[in-house]
Structure formats: C-alpha cells, structure tokens
C-alpha cells in the first residue's frame, strides 16, 4: 500500500526565512515602542535624581532623593493630586453606570442599532480642543445654553459654570462624560453580544423578568468587562489634562489644576526638567497603586462569590 504523501509545508522543516518572519514583523513596533515609551520612561526615571534643566545641557548635578523630598512636601503637588482624585470620582462613576445602562438598552433594539451605536460613539471621535471650545460656549456666562436651561426651570441666578470654584470641576466632568462615554459603551456592547441568547431564553422560560435577568445574569456575566472599563477609566481620569487646560487653564485660582498641568508648567515653563520628572514618577506610582487596589478588591469579591 503506497504511503500518502504529506504536503510540502508539513513535511519540510521551517526555513530560516519563515523562522524569522514573526520577529521581523514585530521589529518596527518594538523599535517605536522602545523609542517613544521605554526610552522616555527610563530617561524620566534617571532625570528625577538630577537637577536637570532646559537651560543647560546634560543631566546636571546629582541630587539623589532631594527632588522626591521636595515634591512630597510641596502643598501644590498634594493640591493637584486632590483635584484629579475628585475628578476621577466625578467621571468614573457615571461613565461606568451610564455606559452600562445605555449598552443594555441599545442591545434590546433590533432595528436601528447601528445608528444608536454611531450616535453614542461619535462624540468620542471629536478632538479635545473642539469639545473644550464647544462647552466653553455652552457654559458661557449670560449667553450660554446651560445658563438658559437653568433659567428655564426657574433659577433666576444660575452659577458661573467655569468661574465658580464650587461648580467648575463638576462642569468639566459633565463635559468629559458626554465626550468619552462612547468608548465604554462600545466595550459593554461587545460584552453583551458575547452572552449567549440561550441564557436569556432559559431565564425567561424560568419566569425571570427583564429586571431580574439584568440583575442576576447580565451584570454578573459582564463582571470582567466592568473591571476593564473601570480600570481604563480610572487611569484616563487620573491623567486628565487637555480639557481642563483649554477650558479653565487650571482656574479659577487653581481650583481645577491637575497634576499633569503642574508637571507641564514645572518642566516647560520653569525649565526644571528634573523636578518635573520626579512629579511624573510620583503620579505614575499613584496610578499603579490605585489600579492595584482596585484589582485586589475585585479579586477578593470574586473569591467571596
């Protein structure tokens, strides 16, 4: 009985060309990743131990942990850190809850679902400069749409949305929610589509109503998606800069100044690159700690279940 001939690709060992095909395709990304992410990160870490300045070449003089001591004792650093933590609370909670609610509602539509996806995701594609300019007109004193809306419900003296320290951060957070909710919405919608329809049908046969299915089936099965959405949102909120810088410049009277704006002013306005690198490293550590604590809480909740 004649032996069956194997295909040439299965019978012959991989050649040198095919063996290096994968690394060769990864090489451009690896080079760019090293140049624009790993390289600057290492330089920032090294510069944080020197008095590096834009006004002189090289790293400057070694100062050790003096920059870190100055940063940790700087009230401005703690003030800006408090601002971004408050901004994170104001944006993360609605961006997680509202995107989940919108995704559940849109998932129930059969016709026109593509239009709803586009409508909710479209604002996320708008540049931050355009969003900031748009909401500066909406929040403008006397002539803004927000002022007219408040007067329409009976409030005679509406607040100055971008001029009152009590309302400025809330106003910027509201604009951020409108702008970025589409990204989380798409993630939740993708997670909903991974839930088999048989699960919904079986629960409906067992007598579970729509709210019971959402509470006991949809929300638990979206647990991993919720963790992903929350972590990404927390990281993005802690790194806020664009909309605050363009809408208020950190004002009024520094009431909304984020840590990244402090880093920007220190490094590029004052030229103190070493100290700015130290502030960047401390912000990086804060983001790591917040993310690690959240992951630990989620893991503990999953074990308790």
Image (cartoon, grey):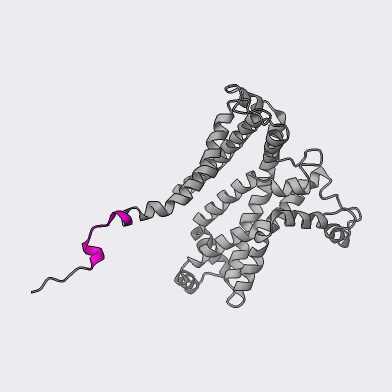
Q: Is residue 305 visible?
A: no
Q: Position of residue 44 (x, y in %)?
A: 57, 34
- Residue 29, x across and y down, in percent: 48, 50
Identify whether 62 is placed above or below 27: above
Closer to us: 198 or 170:
170
Judge left or right: residue 55 versus residue 147.
left
User: Which residue appears farthest toward the left when viewing the image?
Assistant: 1
Q: Nearer the viewer, residue 68 or 305?
A: 68
Q: Report whether residue 228 is seen.
A: yes
Q: Which residues are magenta?
A: 7-17
Most foreground residue, 142 or 99: 142
x, y percent for residue 42: 53, 35
Residue 244 is inside the magenta segment: no
- Position of 93 with respect to 155 (left or right) is left
The structure residue drawn at horizontal position 86% and vertical position 50%, both measured from the top left corner, is 159
> Which sits in the foreground, 199 or 42?
42
Q: Which quarter of the figure has residue 289?
A: top right
């Amino acid at each position: 009985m004649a032996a069956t001939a194997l295909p040439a690709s299965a019978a012959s060992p991989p050649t040198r060309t095919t063996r290096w095909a994968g690394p060769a395709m990864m090489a451009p990304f690896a080079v760019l990743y090293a140049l624009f992410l790993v390289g600057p990160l290492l330089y920032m870490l090294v510069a944080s131990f020197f008095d590096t300045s834009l006004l002189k070449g090289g790293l400057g003089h070694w100062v050790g942990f003096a920059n870190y001591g100055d940063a940790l004792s700087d009230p401005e650093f703690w003030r800006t850190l408090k601002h971004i933590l408050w901004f994170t609370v104001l944006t993360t909670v609605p961006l997680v809850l509202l995107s989940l609610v919108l995704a559940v509602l849109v998932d129930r539509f059969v016709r026109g679902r593509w239009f709803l996806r586009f409508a909710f995701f479209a604002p996320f594609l708008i540049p931050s400069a355009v969003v900031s300019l748009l909401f500066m007109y909406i929040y403008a004193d006397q002539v803004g749409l927000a002022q007219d809306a408040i007067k329409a419900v009976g409030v005679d003296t509406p607040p100055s949305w971008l001029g009152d320290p009590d309302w400025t951060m809330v106003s910027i957070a509201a604009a951020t929610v409108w702008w970025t909710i589409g990204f989380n919405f798409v993630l939740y919608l993708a997670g909903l589509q991974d839930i088999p329809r048989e699960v919904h049908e079986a629960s409906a046969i067992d007598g579970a109503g729509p709210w019971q299915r959402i509470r006991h089936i949809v929300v638990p099965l979206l647990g991993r998606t919720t963790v992903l959405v929350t972590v990404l949102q927390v990281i993005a909120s802690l790194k806020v800069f664009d909309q605050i810088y363009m809408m208020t410049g950190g004002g009024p009277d520094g009431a909304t100044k984020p840590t990244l704006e402090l880093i920007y002013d220190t490094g590029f306005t004052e030229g103190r690159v070493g100290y700015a690198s130290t502030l960047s490293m401390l912000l990086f550590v804060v983001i790591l700690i917040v993310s690690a604590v959240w992951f630990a809480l989620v893991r503990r909740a999953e074990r308790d279940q």
